[in-house]
Amino acid sequence: MRFSLDRIAQPFVAVSERFYPDPFVFAIVLTAITFAVAVLATPTSAAQALEIWGVGLTGFLGFAMQICIVLVCSHALAHTDLVHRGIELVARWPRSAPQAYALIAILAGLTSMVTGALGLVVGALGAQAIAQEGRARGLRLHFPLLVASAYGGFVIWHMGYSGTAPLAVATPGHSLESVMGILPVTETTYTAWNLGLAALTLTAVALVCSRLAPPDEEIVEWVRESSAGSEPASQASLGPVGERLTPADHLDQSRVLSSALGLLLLAFIASWFRSRGFQLTLDLVNWSFLSAGLLLARSPRHYLQLIADASRTLGPIVLQYPLYAAVVALITRTELVGIFSQGFVAMSSSETLGFWAFVSGGVLNFFVPSGGGQWAVQGPIFLAAARELGVADAVVVMGVAYGDQWTNMIQPFWALPLLAIVDLNARAIMGYCFVIFLAAFVCLGAGLLWLGSG
């Protein structure tokens, strides 16, 4: 009999299916908890907390726009013909159910290393494609587990190309430049220890996912109801064809125009790297995905259709960002984050500071589900401790980043784009995600303890 983790997973699955709230309700509850703790644990009055909360609602508007751009550009790129065909090709590889669960975790993980948003979209589309292909071959695949496995691959996103904390400290003019200077991504993201730990963690997640399948009688298979949102836009949706084309229609459907804009962006990116070295910023990541999408789209009209389709996944995210921005304001302006982070710093030595940065980052991620936002509030405290204990800056930067990605497995905010595509609610996958969360803790925590002071 093959080794199975189903018995471990089932209690978590049962609890999440009964008690896990909608992500928007999750955000409201976190807001209430933060408000109460801010009033009870600091000298802040209820009236002052209300003022801080209300003013703080606008705190993430600029950053939210950056995140929305990367989400829609990644979604559009994943729905271009070439990428979509690649997903369908990969979906034919599994020959057994365990292989299917492991493959979707690996596929989502590798694409998450390019950008987290792309990993979420490719993971969702890949889960659907593998489910459809498996059904045609007679494989019984539990669709909630396929989706959870895809989200599990996302647990390494902050170790890759678009990780916001390492990108933030690599950007000239960042908020802590006077303390730490510019920390290039070659000392954080593109180190052997970070990439090796990413590979180890993804391998462990894939193995765990391959052993989580429930008994046959409990399997819920995916039944395709519509191709809407799961395939590239058809030519019929892109406007008039044949003799009805006007000069304006010719321009709208000209691949030359979209390709020219994509090449212009590509030239700018190349010029940036040539003049500044390998200095990445979140904006540059966004322009790279916009460029790739434009180059792979059939025309400007086709790309606009892909973007319009992508925008349908943004509603819940846009709604929740002001709430989380207000929570950040509460925990920073009432000094809650200082009290919280100093507690972890007090337990640290030079060999364990990175580990406690990871744990504290994971806890704070419930209230600030944004790697860049977390670093902004925790960075000053952990950097001061790093100076005092002789720990490399990269260790605490990546420790906070690892914590952010780790508890995403049980903080449903970033699951929203994936869930919107596959039409599932968070409680359907969170029981499995809790087991992935435990596996990731072992890998990431052990890796940081091994790294020590760097």
Image (spheres, rainbow, N blue to C red):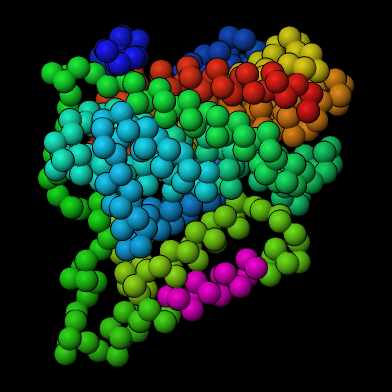
Classify 73 as above or below 164.
Answer: below
Viewer-proximal residue among 350 and 101: 101
Quadrant occupied by the N terminus: top left
Give the image location of residue 122, x and y in percent: 37, 47
Classify 357 as above or below 401.
Answer: above
Viewer-proximal residue among 382 and 260: 260
Q: Residue at position x 58%, y 47% from top? A: 161
Q: Report whether 229 appears left or right of 291.
A: left
Q: Report whether 252 appears left or right of 47.
A: left
Give the image location of residue 371, x and y in percent: 58, 35
In the picture, residue 160 is in which quadrant? top right
Give the image location of residue 94, x and y in percent: 29, 39
Q: Report whether 215 appears left or right of 75.
A: left
Q: Residue at position x 31%, y 28% from top? A: 98
Of helix, strand and loop, which mostly describes the magenta segment? helix
Viewer-proximal residue among 128 and 299: 128
How many labels were placed on the picture? 0
Q: Does 86 appear in magenta?
A: no
Whether residue 267 is visible here, answered yes or no, is: yes
Whether residue 58 is visible here, answered yes or no, is: no
Q: Residue at position x 35%, y 62% from top? A: 82
Give the image location of residue 14, x and y in percent: 26, 12
Q: Residue at position x 30%, y 35% from top? A: 100
User: Furthest residue to the front?
Assistant: 1
Q: Does 265 appear in magenta?
A: yes
Q: Report whether 108 appears left or right of 7.
A: right
Quadrant occupied by the C terminus: top right
Bounds of the magenta span? Answer: 258-270
